[in-house]
Amino acid sequence: VQLVESGGGLVQPGGSLRLSCAASGSIFKIYAMGWYRQAPGMQRELVAAITSGGSTSYADSVKVRFTVSRDNAKNTVYLQMNSLKPEDTAVYYCNADLSLVAGGLRYLFWGQGTQVTVSS
């Protein structure tokens, strides 16, 4: 199983970016998917998460500005980031809570991360 993120880059304050994370491999079912970020010298923190049914949760710092969504048919989760601020600069990671076979154990997989830099 692999999770591959894309869409990071350099953006000016107030700008927007859309991150994508596609899961591939022998997957039976994906339960929750989420986005985390880690700034230099800081702990990794939850940014947003979405269940298989579409329920979402957000860190207080990104509410209103960020939107998480998913396409279950494509095993892909998205993070639309608007009104970006310099303090949003970090490496963004996605994860997926999934099972490989029916009735099997659930595992948490992580992507490799994508850099988001907000600077003028």
Image: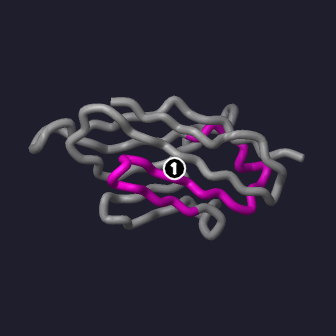
Kind of residue at disc 1: Leu
**Residue 2 belongs to the span the image colors magenta:** no
Instruction: Identify the residue under disc 1.
Output: 46
- Residue occupying the point 48% across, 34% down: 4
User: Residue 5, percent across and down?
Assistant: 53, 38
- Residue occupying the point 61% across, 35% down: 114
User: Residue 89, percent across and down?
Assistant: 72, 43
Q: Quadrant of residue 39?
A: top right
Q: Quadrant of residue 65?
A: bottom right
Q: In the image, is residue 54 above or below residue 12? A: below
- Residue situated furthest bottom in the rendering: 64
Q: Quadrant of residue 102?
A: top left
- Residue occupying the point 48% across, 43% down: 21
**Residue 72 belongs to the span the image colors magenta:** yes
- Residue occupying the point 43% across, 35% down: 3
Q: Is residue 29 left or right of residue 65?
A: left
User: Residue 1, percent across and down?
Assistant: 33, 30
Q: Is residue 117 left or right of residue 35?
A: right
Q: In the image, is residue 35 above or below residue 56? A: above
Tell me where the magenta segment starts and ends, as one range.
67-92
- Residue situated furthest right in the rendering: 120
Q: Nearer the viewer, residue 96 or 4?
A: 4
